Amino acid sequence: MQSKTLRFDGDVTVISSASVVGEKEHTGPIGDVFDLFDATDKFGKKTWEKSEGEMQRLALNIALSKGKMSERDIDAIFAGDLLNQCSASAYGLLDYDVPYFGLYGACSTAAESMMLSAMAVSAGFFSRCAAVTSSHNCSSERQFRTPLEYGAQRSPTAQWTVTGSGAFIIGHGGSVRIAEALPGIVIDKGVNDASNMGAAMAPAAAHTIKRYFEQGEVALDDVDLIVTGDLGYEGSSILCELLLTEGYDIKNKHNDCGMIIFSRGAQDMHSGGSGCGCSAVVMASYILPKIARGELNNVLFIGTGAMMSPSSIQQGLSIPSVGHLLRLCPSTKNKGE
């Protein structure tokens, strides 16, 4: 049996969120909303992998500070990244004396970590959880593609891995409610081009969105925004076409974190942004504040992940993908109820 939509009764919210990004992200169209950036992308470290871990540490520190909390107020951390064995998360969060759950959801990690945090809080196992994720262009490129020094020409369908980290504190009393969640099912449509992850992930996003509208009580007309992360321009076009064949015309309500974070004309990021950090920073500092202010009242966030590895790419295997869905809305705190 396929999983049902999880409805979180009561007060399961995002208490605070924070974002840390690199130079390209800071100079993009929403660059002024991020909490911290480093023009060198190094964050004071000597290797790109250590730089990525430092981004996670900084993002979580800022999120805790915004929520007027310390690590003693957090019961668990759900974190992940793109590096082998999620090493950026493990090293970056090493100094926190908090139980740690390492996740690999590729670009869906922000949605996955928020979902698991909400489930744990809703069930009463934990009072507050931290959901943290990151990606770094320089560490990811040499792991999944080619060394930076090689200077390989990128395909027009390729996406640019975002240098960024997002952190979310999930608990009670926040301004953005996590109302529902629908875990994704792994989908593989035979795409084996690592330079076209949007095409690989779009069917998984379509599958989850279709399941949600078939199972849930929320109709497409009730939704203000369907935001994916990260299909880019190529995958977003495919997603809209796939859902249109199922009777759901989402084109006027859909946007993608990979399209939001970069300017296609001015920055030439080809098909847009990608990576764990892409949807994390866009959600943390751009979408969630809009919900908190009441500018958006019903948002579906679908984190999409291409579940490949360096070995699977080298072996020419197709790319299995997953799409996890969260429905976000203003909390009763914002409504004065």
Image (cartoon, rainbow, N blue to C red):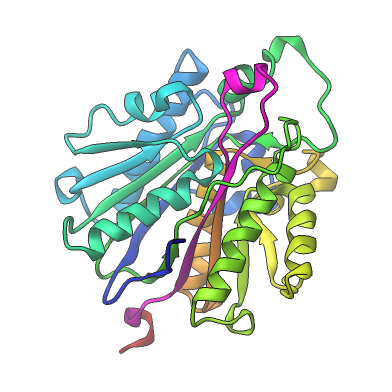
- The residue drawn where x is 59% and y is 43% is 321
Where 285 sits versus 254, above or below? above
Viewer can see residue 170? no
**To which quarter of the image does residue 44 belong?**
top left
The residue depicted at 84 percent of the width and 21 percent of the height is: 153
Of residues 162 and 58, which is closer to you in this image? Answer: 162
**The N terminus: image quadrant:** bottom left
Provide residue 142's location: percent of width, then percent of height.
Answer: 62, 17
Measuring from the top left, give residue 287's x and y in whole percent.
Answer: 54, 63
* Residue drawn where x is 58% and y is 38% of the image: 275
How far across and how far down the image is residue 130, in percent?
Answer: 30, 48
Which residue is farthest top?
Answer: 149
Q: Residue at x 44, y 33 (%)?
A: 55
Nearer to us in this view, 334 or 272:
272
* Image spot of residue 297 (x, y percent): 52, 79
Q: Is residue 332 magenta?
A: yes
Who is closer to the viewer here, 209 or 254?
209
Magenta region: which residues? 304-333
Q: Nearer the viewer, residue 304 or 91?
A: 304
